Image (spheres, rainbow, N blue to C red):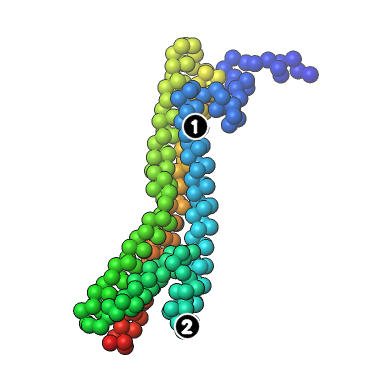
Amino acid sequence: MDPLASVELPGSVGAVDFSIWGLFLSADIVVKAVMILLVAASVWCWAIIFSKWLAVRRLNAKANRFEETFWSGGSLDDLFDRVGEEASDPMASLFGAAMKEWRHAMNRGLTTTAQMRGALQQRVERVMQVSHGREMARLERYMTFLASVGSTAPFIGLFGTVWGIMNAFTSIAASANTSLAVVAPGIAEALFATALGLFAAIPASAFFNKFANDLGRYSDRLDNFAGEFSAILSRHMEERA
């Protein structure tokens, strides 16, 4: 066995642990705080991503089933009795809110004049708008967090990088040694903070754009349904006049 194989040469970085855990343990307290913050943000982002992905799939599946039932030609009153006031998806909630207002007006005879029918039409459209806004606000919950992580995580990682490089230069000045053994650990810690920032920001930004597009299309779908349903109710009022 070569006796020189176990000798640590000056300037060697062989004794430095460059694993992820080793870089974390050897980092400054400020860099550690940045790393923990970015890892926590990344974990929370992935939890939101999986939750939103499943929610969008369920929304579209439920909307497909509801629209199939709605356009099957059955009675709107029977459908409302089945759906009830506690609907399980936004489209059914919008339908239920409009039907509740419609039934209230019908039971009280508030459609005898053109003016009353016009007022009812406006109320129905208004309650659908309110229901639409409430449901979309619920669906868009946590989207702001994804957008915030996507835009700020790289800068937080950059802050950790700058701080780590400052520590690296401080070590050089304190040891009066510019060897790789002195410089490499601090630079590695600094770049690791940047990598964590990008690891958190890239999926957060990408999936924010995807979900924003998916929810935008779903919102348009609700708007189209509300317009069609409003036209159907208007036609019913004219037929009963």
Task: Tell me which corner region of the image, top left, top right, bottom left or bottom right, holds residue 201.
Answer: top left
What is the secondary structure assignment of the residue under circle 2?
loop
Disc nearer the start of the sequence (2/1): 1
The answer, for residue 37, to whether it is visible in the render is yes
Label 1 crowd (10 A; few <14 / some 14-19 / many >=20): many
Does residue 153 appear to the left or right of 3 in the view shown? left
Q: Of the residues shown, which amino acid type is indicated by label 2? A: Gly
Between 94 and 13, the residue placed more toward the observer is: 94
Between 91 and 16, the residue placed more toward the observer is: 91
Label 2 crowd (10 A; few <14 / some 14-19 / many >=20): few
Residue that numbered label 2 is attached to: 74
Q: Is residue 225 above or below residue 176?
A: below
Q: Quadrant of the N terminus?
A: top right
Q: Is residue 161 above or below residue 115?
A: above
Residue that numbered label 1 is attached to: 35
The answer, for residue 230, to whether it is visible in the render is no
Q: Residue furthest right?
A: 1
Measuring from the top left, give residue 154's x and y in whole percent: 42, 38
Task: Tell me which corner region of the image, top left, top right, bottom left or bottom right, holds residue 220.
Answer: bottom left
